[in-house]
Amino acid sequence: MHEMSVARSLIKSLEEIKDKEGLLRITEVRVKVGILTGVEPSLLEKAFYYIKRGTSFEDTNIIIEIEGIRVKCINCGYECIVKAYNYACPSCGSPEISLEGGDSLIIESVKGL
Ligand SMILES: [Zn+2]
């Protein structure tokens, strides 16, 4: 399951943040999951709760937000969020669009003590 390795690397990132910020524990992590990552938020949540057991993140809650595919038209500069990347600009019809977001998993914020 893809989500298990994502959850594992999430824990690793949290360890780094915890050390860097000098936190005793992290109570909440908010992540933004781009649609194009193929990560299923409910599975990621389950995987995170499974993997955090026995670690120092046992009390950490995870909040997952889904990020749509953000594209920008190279031709006219129009920006919008779409459901699928197979796409032409709705403003000018140009197929030359660039991907601006929705293809990555980002730790947006952490709350800790
Ligand atoms: Zn356009």
Image (cartoon, helix red, strand yellow):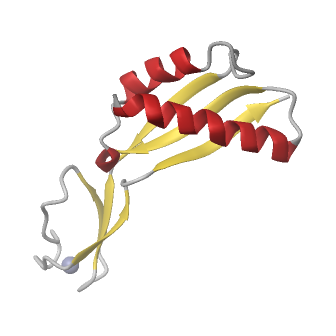
Comparing 57 with 85, the one in front is 57
Identify the image quadrant of residue 101.
bottom left
From the top left corner, tell me how far across and down residue 52 is, in percent. Answer: 61, 20
Q: Is residue 37 above or below residue 40?
A: below
From the top left corner, tell me how far across and down residue 110 is, in percent. Answer: 70, 37
Q: Is residue 79 above or below residue 110?
A: below
Q: Number of callouts in the render? A: 0
**What residue is shown at x 14% (from left), y 79% (from top)?**
92
* Quadrant in the picture for the C terminus: top right
Q: Is residue 99 above or below residue 36?
A: below
Q: Residue furthest bottom?
A: 75
From the top left corner, tell me how far across and down residue 49 is, in percent. Answer: 54, 16
Q: Is residue 105 left or right of residue 92?
A: right
**Is residue 87 something one can see in this rendering?**
yes
Q: Is residue 44 left or right of residue 108?
A: left
**What residue is shown at x 89% (from left), y 40% (from top)?**
22
* Quadrant in the picture for the N terminus: top left
**What residue is shown at x 54% (from left), y 32% (from top)?**
8
From the top left corner, tell me how far across and down residue 106 is, in percent. Answer: 53, 48
